[in-house]
Image (spheres, rainbow, N blue to C red):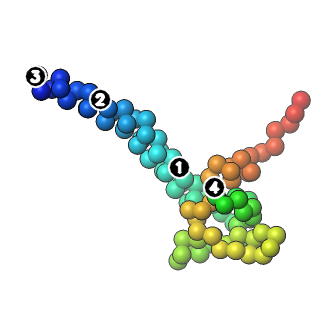
Amino acid sequence: MDQLTQFAPIILMFVVVYFFMIRPQMKKAKQEKKFASELKKGDRIITKSGMHGKIVDFSEKNNSVIIETGAGKITFDKSSISMEMSQKLNEPVKDKK
């Protein structure tokens, strides 16, 4: 019983780290994977590096998307698409009253 009380702070620390660090990261990774799988032609996106464009085609062999920008067509990996910025870009415009 005395050994259990010695290890209680360490066990508590692992529980706190799991719920405040590991679990939210796993949840966000799952959301990003779902977002990448739901992309379709015509979606407007922003890459993590700040490139704006519209999806023209997919390359399933390379797990990438072909994006049309002002400079032409560029191929990007699906993981380089920013989920947060792309969702904000595609939100419907709210009327200001």
Q: Residues within 10 Å of mark 4 (few under 14, many from 20)?
A: some
Q: Measure how far apart labels 1 and 3 are at the Cα level.
A: 42 Å
The mark that comes first in sequence, 1 or 3, is 3
Q: Tell me, for residue 1, which label it has, or none.
A: 3
Residue under numbered circle 2:
12
Tell whether 28 sits left or right of 94. left
Q: Residue furthest front?
A: 6
Q: Where residue 20 sits in the image (x, y, percent)? A: 43, 35
Q: Measure how far apart labels 4 and 2 are at the Cα level.
A: 35 Å
The mark that comes first in sequence, 2 or 1, is 2
Q: Quarter of the image holding residue 4? A: top left
The mark that comes first in sequence, 4 or 1, is 1
What's the amino acid at mark 2? Leu
Q: Nearer the viewer, residue 57 or 15?
A: 15
What's the amino acid at mark 4? Ser
Residue under numbered circle 1:
31
